Image (spheres, grey):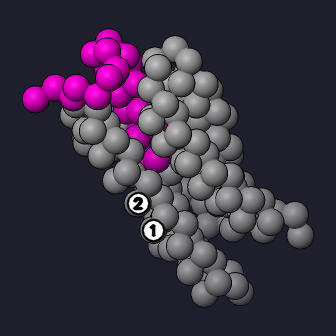
Amino acid sequence: MKANIGISENHLKAVAEKLQVVLADEQVLYTKTRNYHWNVVGDNFSEMHIFFEKQYDELAEIVDEVAERIRMLGHYSTGRLVDFLKLTNLLEPEYSNVQSEQIKNLLDDHETIIRHLRELITEFAEKQKDLGSSDFVTGLLRQHEKMAWMLRSYLDK
């Protein structure tokens, strides 16, 4: 059944398509963070293992919220890894167990997502007339800004 929420079907479709990219970015970042959690090494192993776990737990919730937002708009969410890799704005670097590289890679990804979300806030509100989705991505933006700040703090030593 189509969503009858006061937004045209064309606008709902456009928002859902943009959110599919956000979903792909979130899933790739989740997987990368989980990988670093598994493969972190160093004299602060325990701290970083827990730190990465907290971040991927938060990202897992974000992934679910984005997928559910797409469904709320009356569209199906992408769910195959091959599709995520086609849609994502993020890159997958070679494996690394160097903490500073891991943190920098994750920070770069969060900042890429932040820049993309900033564009979507205005687009969803003004072009697609979807204030709910604009507000939704504003919330995602705040979450990513906080995670980026935490990652950045490890690099500013």
Dot 2: few (<14), some (14–19), or many (≥20) neighbours within 10 Å?
Answer: few
**Is residue 10 rendered magenta in the image?**
yes
Q: Residue at x 52, y 14 (%)?
A: 127
Q: How many marks?
A: 2
Image coords of residue 44 (percent x, y): 69, 85
Q: Secondary structure at mark 1?
A: helix
Mark 1: give few (<14), some (14-19) or many (20+) Cα within 10 Å: some
Disc 1 target residue:
57
Note whether 14 is above or below 112 in the view shown: above
Which label number is shown at residue 38? none
Question: Where does the image place residue 153, in percent across and percent down from the top left?
Answer: 80, 66
Instruction: Confirm whether residue 23 shows in the render.
Output: yes
Q: Which residues are magenta?
A: 1-28
Label number found at residue 61: 2
The secondary element bearing badge 2 is classed as helix
Q: Are marks 2 and 1 in contact (CB under 8 Å)?
A: yes
Q: Amino acid at mark 2?
A: Glu
